[in-house]
Amino acid sequence: MTAYAALEALNARAGTLGEALSILHWDQQAMMPAGGNDSRGEQTALLETMIHEIAAGPAMGEAIEAASAQNDLDPWQRANVAESRRRYLRATALPAELVAAKARAESQAFAVWQQARPADDFVAALPALRTCFNLARQAGQAIADATGQPLYEAMIAGFEPDLSVAEIDAVFDDYAAFLPDFLDNVLAAQHRREPPIPLEGPFDIELQKAAFQDIMGALGFDFDHGRLDTSAHPFCGGTPSDVRMTTRYSDGAFLDAMMGVVHETGHALYEQGLPAQWARQPVGQARGMVLHESQSLTIEMQIVRSQAFMTFAAPKLAQAFGKSGPAWSAENLASHAARVERSFIRVEADEVTYPAHVILRYRLEKAMLTGDLDLADLPQAWGDGLEALLGIRPPSDREGCLQDIHWYSGAFGYFPTYSLGAMCAAQVFAAAREQLGEVEAQIEVGDFAPLLNWLRTNIHSKASSGSTNEILMAATGSALRTDAFKAHLQRRYLDG
Amino acid sequence: MTAYAALEALNARAGTLGEALSILHWDQQAMMPAGGNDSRGEQTALLETMIHEIAAGPAMGEAIEAASAQNDLDPWQRANVAESRRRYLRATALPAELVAAKARAESQAFAVWQQARPADDFVAALPALRTCFNLARQAGQAIADATGQPLYEAMIAGFEPDLSVAEIDAVFDDYAAFLPDFLDNVLAAQHRREPPIPLEGPFDIELQKAAFQDIMGALGFDFDHGRLDTSAHPFCGGTPSDVRMTTRYSDGAFLDAMMGVVHETGHALYEQGLPAQWARQPVGQARGMVLHESQSLTIEMQIVRSQAFMTFAAPKLAQAFGKSGPAWSAENLASHAARVERSFIRVEADEVTYPAHVILRYRLEKAMLTGDLDLADLPQAWGDGLEALLGIRPPSDREGCLQDIHWYSGAFGYFPTYSLGAMCAAQVFAAAREQLGEVEAQIEVGDFAPLLNWLRTNIHSKASSGSTNEILMAATGSALRTDAFKAHLQRRYLDG
């Protein structure tokens, strides 16, 4: 066996355990009875330990060194070695005790947050948050020392491996400067139009399920390699050959549930489009959270919230629910899907104001890491930051720095990927439109195949064979920028 | 860490991987889209390999030796060491190449059987069956050499660790001698009575689901530690704290589906009653397939098919399906649940004739292993054997030696546990009735708690702390015998 083959065998073993873990995670969220929680905790902790034993083991280090010295590798194999090395460096940088302490602290902080958020009690959550933050910073520093990256970049790279803080700064500062005047204009324009006609429910949940499955199928989701279920928080998990999507239903706001489904469908299409011959190898995985989010948002924001898509979907939805009348016109549904509002809660924000929520968290994370912001001052800094970006202050911490789970589960550096993904989606879709020509006309008649093929060819099939910006450059002719996103917003909210 | 603690740690690791595997198996049968099959195969093969690496590894051997030398162990710990040793001996007896060759041959024979059975083509299946049988015998011989057991006993011990061939012979010969006259009498008595009034469907499947969940709950199934789903073949899987039961529905014969559900509920109650403090240790597992089947059949045969249970269930079922009239009386439902008939298919047989199907297979397995029966002569031997036991010959191999999956998936020695379990169930239930007094009266009003508590105390909580006969002796005052089973059949089918 060549050194490179030995490396693939180690990766395959860790990757296969990772697949098992992903199915167990899905089951825990979507299927498992509550009483199974303790033993599921044992199972996932053991699998994670075993994956880490392989990923950071001496055999992996030796295989990477020996494979790097082989000069008969093709570009994908070389990329596989490089990606293996990147992961190995991160895995070996962390002492086992720090990993264990982090896991414990995150589990505790999560439990504290679950109590503190409804009680609007940031003071109660602060000690656990501080512990969690300090350990995350410590872990980030260990990785930064091992990789030579700046601290915050090393932390972001846990979610998005390829974008520098300088690149992210440029993109976010540009949008922050653009937003205030643009938002005023959008709200003024919206004020001049009639509000959308309400959609009268209730909407039977079984009918919703059937309708959403139809839409997923039309968008190209392959039900032979995936399924849709219900969980408290929608997600897309599982493995590329067996994608597990979830959503949540209510018999009132079916449009929210539908947006959740199509968002996760975008993630799922990316996974289903990864190259099967590289399954379970690092080079065969999705490139990172920016490209991943770009795929969900290409579907949700660029396509589904458009007038063209609603032209296709409106009659189907009306029929599915047995409805008719002007409320069920494509125009009215598109109008529902594109309302803009200054608001406090990130997950409920529209696509114009959403980046403000992310830029706020990004700036706060940077300030916490430099020491410029003590965690005790987060409520104040949150209010100041949101006011600077959106002109509003949250009336409570529940609507402010307690609203998101991320920091209370140790995820620092994750937030930026959401809005970078939105910008990336606009850039990707603009390139696809330009190269394909008739995309809107195809969408209006429900022909999504050309667009999906374009995404498969230019994004999905690339997996981790190049960096995020290399993939973007080849697909769109440019590294990540804000112009396509701003042009999209201009078109949808001002020119439309 | 003491040697014993080291042994527990190794067992816990293998046991935890086994739990993960059991959930993945359930998912594969009940949830997984077909396209996930290849990658699921990779996942389960890897987990099985890793479990075997631990179970048969040198560390396990050393821990068992060292723990055996400790003189400070309590009886459960000693039993845990002994059970660990038993498993280790079996695991190390098999060369890895034999395990792999067996798995390949079984997978091939299964595929061949899936084609050959509907085509009624035993000749087409014979080569694959022969390979499968030869490898099973080879594996059995390797285990027999390592453990000092006779060959067939070593094979049976893969499913039921504690019963000798001499004990099984005695029980089966006794029943085979009893059956012909008894069956004639039962059929004559049945002929003198009115046949049951048909139950007019269709029965809505959602209504069936709801009704069965109610019955499971009444019987004591804990939905906080388990769930009921649908699969092609009903089974009870998962883990003791997270039991995954499945059934299949048809809108016609709801009573068959209900019997499947309560059968699996009996298995599930055993799992849920195992001692949680010994979870993932060998001593904490169910003792074997005889006691396991006894628990499913205590519920299905002893309880649910009784007049007393139908007195409780009949009005609930009638209400659930919106039915009324004499067809829905307890007497009529009990009569449906206790029809006897000479027939060809084991899985459709009633409890009087079922043992004949099993004794036939048991005798054929013995003859194949001694070499007295060549596999090519199975169709002839099958017909002769069934005629001797039940007085009928199958008109085809599809209704004869092609009907069961077991041999075509390498399971030789499994069949006897079905009928031993039925006999065991009668013996267990007779002891419970005697010790508890009012069991029938409790069942009529749906009070299953005293009986479940008795089973928990006398069977479930014992796990593998003693042998099958030790547990039976303590619970019923006797090793496994046929009298209680015969008395039960006499009461239900002749005196009733």
Image (cartoon, coloured by chain):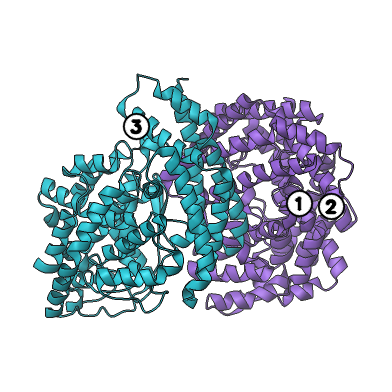
Chain colours: A purple, B cyan
Residue A65 in percent (x, y) is at 81, 33
Marks 1/3 in contact by CB < 8 Å: the verdict is: no
- On screen, residue B244 versus residue A455, left or right, reads left
| Residue depicted at x 66% and y 71% | A218
Q: Which residue is mark 1?
A: A291
Residue B37 in percent (x, y) is at 59, 59
Q: Amino acid at mark 3?
A: Ala
Residue B244 in percent (x, y) is at 42, 53
User: As drawn, which residue projects farthest toward the front?
Assistant: B372
Viewer-closest of A227 and B397: B397
The chain letter for the residue carrying disc 3 is: B
Viewer-closest of B452 and A360: B452
How far is mark 2 from mark 3, CA to CA? Answer: 60 Å
Q: Which mark is residue B79?
A: 3
| Residue depicted at x 17% and y 44% | B478
For disc 1, the neighbor class at 10 Å (few under 14, some 14 to 19, many from 20) is many
